[in-house]
Amino acid sequence: MVAMPPGGGRIQDFHATTDVRPSIVSSGSNADSWAVGSLYMDLSTAGSAPIEIVDVKPHVLRRDLGAPAWIYQPFPGCGPIPPDRIFKFNLDKPSWTDEGVNTNGPMGPPASDVPTAALGPNFVIEPNTHARIRVSTLACHGNYEWNLDIVYAKPGATDFEHYVVGPFASYGLANNTTLYEGRPDDNGVVQVDRQSVISGSPKYFCS
């Protein structure tokens, strides 16, 4: 679900033939996730030498973002399970958990070159390979701004280098916020099937 802060535009301003959420988030309107979200990163080395991913450090920058003006919830669908290395980030606590590479039920994990080792000297990305990381966020009691510090090094090096991604926003507190539920029609316009006004925390995901 996507949350739009005040002044970021109307739900009718965004169009897509399948999923309108990427269009909303990439519009520069500061829209981001509501309650639960997923951030995907594809890590690789630009040179001919491998690199070690020493750590991934989340930082909460703000806890006082205003409530979103509206939330868009598409009707659920389904799809394949990608071979991601999953980290869970609970912004309310806050807590950061390495969940490893996701599995695909009884069939085991999908084929992937994502390292399964813990972050550190054994988490190595070789040239011409990629490590797809998914950060699954949860926000239930506040509206947050945050970023990630990717700490990496060349094997055997004593100095660490940093690559900061973000900032991002995660919303979990509404105040007379309009909730739209629907999907794009054949013309790419969001067809709103249900509309309501909510305040407080999301009840479905948060106890």
Image: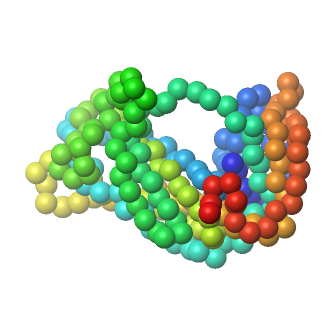
180 with respect to 110 (left or right): right
Q: Nearer the viewer, residue 48 or 177?
A: 177
Give the residue at x 21% y 53%: 120
Q: Nearer the viewer, residue 128 or 183?
A: 183
200 with respect to 152 (left or right): right
Give the residue at x 29% y 57%: 55
Give the residue at x 60% y 53%: 36
Could you tell me residue 154's position as x and y percent?
A: 19, 49
Way the structure is coloured: rainbow
Residue 21 appears in the rendering: yes
| Snapshot quadrant of residue 45 | top left
Quadrant into which the C terminus falls: bottom right
79 with respect to 29 (left or right): left
Could you tell me residue 66's position as x and y percent?
A: 72, 72
14 with respect to 102 (left or right): right
| Snapshot quadrant of residue 130 | top left
Q: Nearer the viewer, residue 69 or 174?
A: 174
| Residue most extreme to the left | 156
Seen in the picture, residue 97 relative to 95 is either above or below; the reply is above
Give the residue at x 27% y 40%: 116
Residue 9 appears in the rendering: no
| Snapshot quadrant of residue 182 | top right
Could you tell me residue 155's position as x and y percent?
A: 15, 47
Could you tell me residue 196's position as x and y percent?
A: 88, 55
